[in-house]
Image (tube, rainbow, N blue to C red):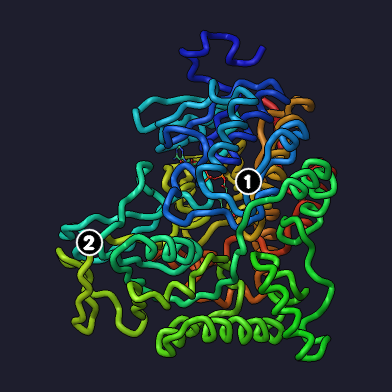
Amino acid sequence: MTESTKKDASQTRSFDALVIGAGFSGLYQLLCLRDRLGLSVKVLEAGAGVGGTWYWNRYPGARCDSESHSYCYTFSEELWKEWEWSEKYPGPPEIMRYLNHVADKFDLRRDIRFGTKVTAAHYNEATNRWHVTTDSGEVLTARFLVSAVGCLSTANVPDIPGLDTFKGKWYHTGQWPHEGVDFRGTRVGQIGTGSTGIQSAPVIAATAAHLTVFQRTANYSVPARNGPLTPAFNRWIHDNMEEIRTTMRAAVNGHPFLLSETLTLSIPAEERHARYEKAWEVGGLRFRAVFRDLVTSNEANATAVTFLKDKIRKIVKDPATAEKLADIDHPYAAKRPPIDTDYFETFNRDNVALVDVRADPIERVTPTGIRLKSGAEHPLDIIVFATGFDGMTGSILKMDIRGRGGLSLREAWKAGPRNYLGLQVAGFPNLFTVTGPGSPSVLCNMPVAIEQHVEWITDCIDYLRTNGLTQIEPTEEAMDSWVQEVNRAADATVLPQAKHSWYLGANIPGKPRVFMPYAGGMAYYRKICADVAARNYEGFTMTGD
Ligand SMILES: Cc1cc2nc3c(=O)[nH]c(=O)nc-3n(C[C@H](O)[C@H](O)[C@H](O)COP(=O)(O)OP(=O)(O)OC[C@H]3O[C@@H](n4cnc5c(N)ncnc54)[C@H](O)[C@@H]3O)c2cc1C
């Protein structure tokens, strides 16, 4: 008998498993543990609905940059065939409709508690159970705890002096008001030019009286070339789930296309340029796949850098603005590579200005705007923080997680995250993290990474049950060797060279500088995880009661 059948469901505070978060990860984890393994499961979600990233990020211009037919689950052919995406890169409303459809179709909502934030999770050694505390003070317990809190779910609002004195309104893109923001007739200041800022600036500029973009780190961007999906393409998607899934699983980044076999410098310069032009016309993240070695060779990457900076200089009419936008200090794709709709073109509008805050930093927010170190004042009615997230570890470490002997995860990760396969941490038995640090995660088309993690965790828990085991955690040695592998994989790429990257935690003052995601590729990582499981969970210690 599972624990939920022992008591009336509404009274139950004791479960086989608790899952934190109801985005792509938490929804699928609930379905797997409840419907495939028959466990009693509760999902605890801070938001008032499902959707995770898409519930919170409703800012103007928000869209996925994975192609829609790959930004979805592949575990159910029925679900795959009955859903039809309207465009190549849909925004939050459509992705939310999809995730709500999933929640309804699989009757997931009855086991999700919304408006419930987890503040602490403590492991009790005597009972081998996790005691999970919510913001209302309630304590729920479970044998297994799955953190599906998301890699990009803790908004990073920079600590700029004077923000509390601002008389206008300010917003963070990752906590956007669900009723929207009316920019008409207003002077808007946008801080941040990462993927989000590059999406939002053109849309804000189209309605605001004036937009000032405050840029600290200039960034590459490739046109998304968004558009509606044709009926013929949709038919092809419906009929070819297996083929699409096979490609995504074989691809380094989990996208529905493979890297080119061609090495960048193996062909003459004119041919290389022609390929870049073609890839620019195709647009989106396929640009990154145009050559095999763009992120593994600095020499190869430099050719993409030249091509992309030339494009900026051609698009942006004012030479001084173009120079600021093209003054990019990192290799292409070493930061999350943005894709856009008219980002650079936006700077040709009369109502848009670019301010280089690396040259002249923001000194403070005043009651009426932003003042720079030079004394220059920018009067504003609205400030938009497109400043991203405390990525990968922010949401996990916000909770007071304690394992054996009261060991705190914050303490264990003081010098940076350490775990085994990105899935478990020594000293924290039966705690699993979905797409956390040490896994391909944000370097990947995430639904692919999420399905792999959720299925691995489900199989692992099933293995424990089948073998009369109740506890699993990695050995310190396995964890040490995985940390080495994560570092090795990162150092084999140009990715750690972006000094201001959130992949490195560099956007958060005081955060240790450690390259967090696993850069060895999703396909390779999947094989490593499968091999570990096939060797009876090598590197883990498992015990029974
Ligand atoms: C603007 C934007 C665009 C993106 N576009 C893409 C894309 O095109 N392709 C791609 O692959 N990825 C993209 N991502 C990454 C995206 O986060 C993942 O694709 C995916 O949505 C992650 O799902 P998740 O369930 O793991 O996490 P999330 O969707 O972040 O969900 C985590 C949930 O956990 C909840 N939570 C967190 N802490 C607590 C707590 N203490 N207690 C209770 N609940 C908690 C949060 O409220 C949230 O609902 C994008 C991210 C952003 C921000």
| Label 2: few (<14), some (14–19) or many (≥20) C-alpha neighbours in 10 Å | some
In front: mark 1 or mark 2? 1
Q: Position of residue 127 (x, y in %)?
A: 55, 25
Answer with left or right where residue 109 lies relative to residue 174.
right
* Residue denoted by label 2: 381
Looking at the rendered structure, the number of numbered marks drawn on it comes to 2
Q: Is residue 300 visible?
A: yes
Asked if labels 2 and 1 touch by Cβ distance under 8 angstroms, the answer is no
Q: Secondary structure at mark 2?
A: loop
Q: Secondary structure at mark 1?
A: loop
Answer with left or right where residue 426 lies relative to residue 508.
right
Tell me how far mark 1 sits from mark 2, CA to CA: 35 Å
Q: Nearer the viewer, residue 521 or 460?
A: 521
Q: Position of residue 396 (x, y in %)?
A: 48, 47
Q: Position of residue 453 (x, y in %)?
A: 68, 44
What residue sits 57% from the left and 77% below the top? 497
The amino acid on which the numbered mark 1 sits, given as a three-letter code, is Ser
The amino acid on which the numbered mark 2 sits, given as a three-letter code, is Asp
* Residue denoted by label 1: 86
What residue sits 47% from the left and 13% below the top? 10
Q: Quadrant of the N terminus?
A: top right
Q: Earlier in the sequence, mark 1 or mark 2?
A: 1
